[in-house]
Image (spheres, rainbow, N blue to C red):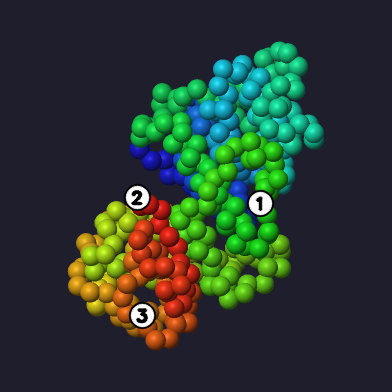
Amino acid sequence: MSDPQFERLVSGSRLRLRGKSAFFATLLLHADIVPSREVLLAGTDGERVYVNPENAATLTPDSFDGLLLHEVLHAALSHVPRRGPREKKKWNRAANLIVNGMVAQAGLPIPPDAPRDDHMEQLSVEEVYTALGEGEGEDGEGNGGSDGDDDLMDGPPSDAPPKGQRSGDDAKRQWGQALAQARSVEAMLGKGDDPLGLHRELRRLEPARLDWKSQLWRFLARTPVDFGGFDRRFIGRGMYLEALDDESLRALIAVDTSGSVDDEAVRALIGEVQGVLGAYPHVQATLYYADTEAYGPYELRAGDEVPAPQGGGGTDFRPVFKAAETAEPDVIIYLTDGYGDFPTAAPRVPTLWVVPAGGLEDNGFPFGDVLRLEDGQ
């Protein structure tokens, strides 16, 4: 059962972090944050973040933002599964030393009694654990969240809603992709690096490959002013959110239904687009199916059932681009194997061709960027 007040609390934090750091905000968008009254303040089992709604509501907005970021970083950096057989409280202390430094670096408050160490904050959690003296971290009073000895949990609390069956490797892989997408969005905004780019913690993890999903997020996380050369100086002056509000991005999603693209690829692409729509309110999307004609438009929204495909004939890309002249989207995303008739002139808007395995080579597309689906997608 949903808790509107709790959802407002979390969505407010996500919005505030968007104004502070695109990198950290993107990580929070990937976090499954659920209420639980069994945790004192907050905790994570490595997959989801659990927050006590009553106690968290007493925090100032900045303190709540720091609390959420603290737990999300624990999850994203795989601090729960990486513990292995190590002593739990000492491991939690080591992980907290690192994460507290990251939260402070983001300009958010940490509890007054939270431990800090400028040197150890730059190490990996395994190195900090080894450097801590014997028995350090085994005592001490935790606050059940931002610096407690119980915020790295062995499993979900009993009052948490059920979750799907996933292995620890699945969770680690998904958080790895979230980190990759966060880096991608941060780089796209022109910062040149993410806040954790040189941190030894990330170098100890397997580097997450920037797969097609991350590239799609990077393409759609922009705004029209980004494509048109947005003045990056405004970002540092806190004006980027205004640009997001004033400059919504309209995406035209076209799906080749000539029979050359399988259903799995269609579901994968539309599912990822819906994920972006749920995460970035400034993105709007309409869907067209196409063979030798364009069928649509259909409004595409996060969580909605996708309209049944139409078509099944040959492949002609021109009807979709003709429709785009009237619809005036800001970007076009076209899922196709690339074998068909192209327009004689390139459109005036950025185009992303999403191509399954076995599709046309990159140099066969006369305009736009080409994104390759992984084998089996």
The residue where tag 2 is placed is: 376
Left or right placement of residue 230 versus residue 315 in this view: right
**CB-based contact (under 8 Å), mark 3 and mark 1:** no
Q: Which residue is drawn at 67% across and 15% down?
A: 138
Identify the residue at horizontal 80%, vertical 33% (top origin). 119
Task: Return the x and y of residue 234 as percentages of the image width and height.
Answer: 68, 68
Look at the image and tell me in which quarter the N terminus lies.
Answer: top left
For badge 2, the amino acid type reads Gly
- Residue holding disc 3: 342
**Residue at horizontal 68 percent and vertical 59 percent from the top:** 191
Q: Position of residue 142 (x, y in %)?
A: 64, 22
Residue 295 can be seen, yes or no: no
Residue at the disc numbered 1:
194
Q: Taking 19 as reference, is 196 above or below it?
A: above
**Residue 181 spot, x, y in % from top left:** 54, 52
Image quarter of residue 94:
top right
Between circles 1 and 2, the one closer to the viewer is 2
The Cα atoms of the two marked residues, 3 and 1, are separated by 38 Å
The numbered mark, 1 or 2, whose residue comes first in the sequence reads 1
Q: What element carries label 3?
A: loop
Q: How many numbered discs, if any?
A: 3
Mark 2, Cα crowd under 10 Å, few <14 / some 14-19 / many 20+, is: few
- Determine the secondary structure under disc 1: loop
As rendered, which of 164 and 291 lies closer to the eye?
291
Disc 2 secondary structure class? loop
Position above or below: 315 against 164: below
- Mark 3 Cα-neighbour bin, 10 Å: few <14, some 14–19, many ≥20: some
